[in-house]
Image (spheres, rainbow, N blue to C red):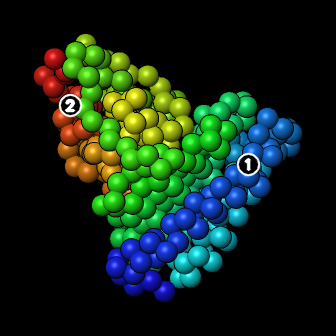
Amino acid sequence: MIEDYETIDEFLTRHAGDVEEAVRKAAAQEIMPRWRRLADDEVDQKSGPHDLVTDADRQAELYLTEALRLLMPGSEVVGEEAVHDNPATYEAIQGDAPVWIVDPVDGTRQFVRGETGFCTLVALARHGSVLASWTYAPAQDRFATARRGQGAFLDGVRLHAGPPEPGRDLRVATSHPDYTTDDQKRALLGLRVPGVAPRPCGSAGLEYLDVALGRVDATAFSWEAAWDHAAGILLVEEAGGIHLTRAGEPFRITGGNDLPFTTARDAATARQVAALLAGDPGSQPG
């Protein structure tokens, strides 16, 4: 059983590559053979027609759950599909044991449609702090990693998000209105001001990658599920960005956040977007 951050650091030094290999194998064995080949009986709805799950999601999560527990005995796994089946498993994020946070196919709708905009997300966290993350887009052959205090990388190249280009509208990926409460819809409407160009998001994991790359300036998301956010927020942080709720506080993967929240490529952009979400029109760019 790993008991402190120093030994987790030692684990990551020895085994970060093994985690990447497990993610790649899960995609190669369980996801990509089903891409563009899904039968009708391999796709189900969860909460509704926009919330899909496939055999690829289920089998990739099972593969990763076994592989990650073998790599780190005593660790817990919080996977999207396991939590759907048994919500109590989400409580492991609050516990003392290191926890793997897994989204086997982030962007399932895109996957079902045969598009390339999906990825597998894995994060390692303890006591609410994300320590390492792996983001793999197998149909695009892109693999991003991050480790707290040691940077973010895409295919081995270090990422530096940097500030947005002066004078250009801020590009902000937002929650789709179908997944927001009335209060959150009103908050997101705060982004419809001059100098901001909001649009509905695709795969959350790939939106975070684009923030880390500087291709998107910020996100504005209205849900807390840790499997969608844990890997990406560390990736952006290690590329130089930050995350803030509309209350101006860092987003917590353990929950209880004032939503929506933003993750942005630099601190100034994060503060602007968070203020607009909080209803401060004086914070608009320019």
Q: Amino acid at mark 1?
A: Ile
Total residue callouts: 2
Tell me the element at label 2: helix
Q: Which residue is mark 1?
A: 31
Q: Position of residue 66 (x, y in %)?
A: 67, 71
Check the image and report above or below for 40 versus 176: below
Q: Position of residue 90 (x, y in %)?
A: 51, 64
Separation of disc 1 and disc 2 at Cα?
38 Å
At 32% from the left edge and 38% from the top edge, which residue is drawn?
Answer: 161
> Which residue appears farthest toward the left when viewing the image?
282
At 73% from the left edge and 31% from the top edge, which residue is drawn?
Answer: 114
The quarter holding residue 217 reads top left
Q: Between residue 94 and residue 180, name the one nearer to us.
A: 94
Q: Position of residue 117 (x, y in %)?
A: 60, 34
Tell me the element at label 1: helix
At 46% from the left edge and 76% from the top edge, which residue is drawn?
Answer: 11
At 53% from the left edge and 82% from the top edge, which residue is drawn?
Answer: 74
Q: Between residue 114 and residue 71, name the one nearer to us.
A: 71
Q: Is residue 162 left or right of residue 67?
A: left
Q: Amino acid at mark 2?
A: Gln
Q: Which residue is mark 2?
A: 272
- Front disc: 1 or 2: 1
Q: Position of residue 83 (x, y in %)?
A: 59, 60
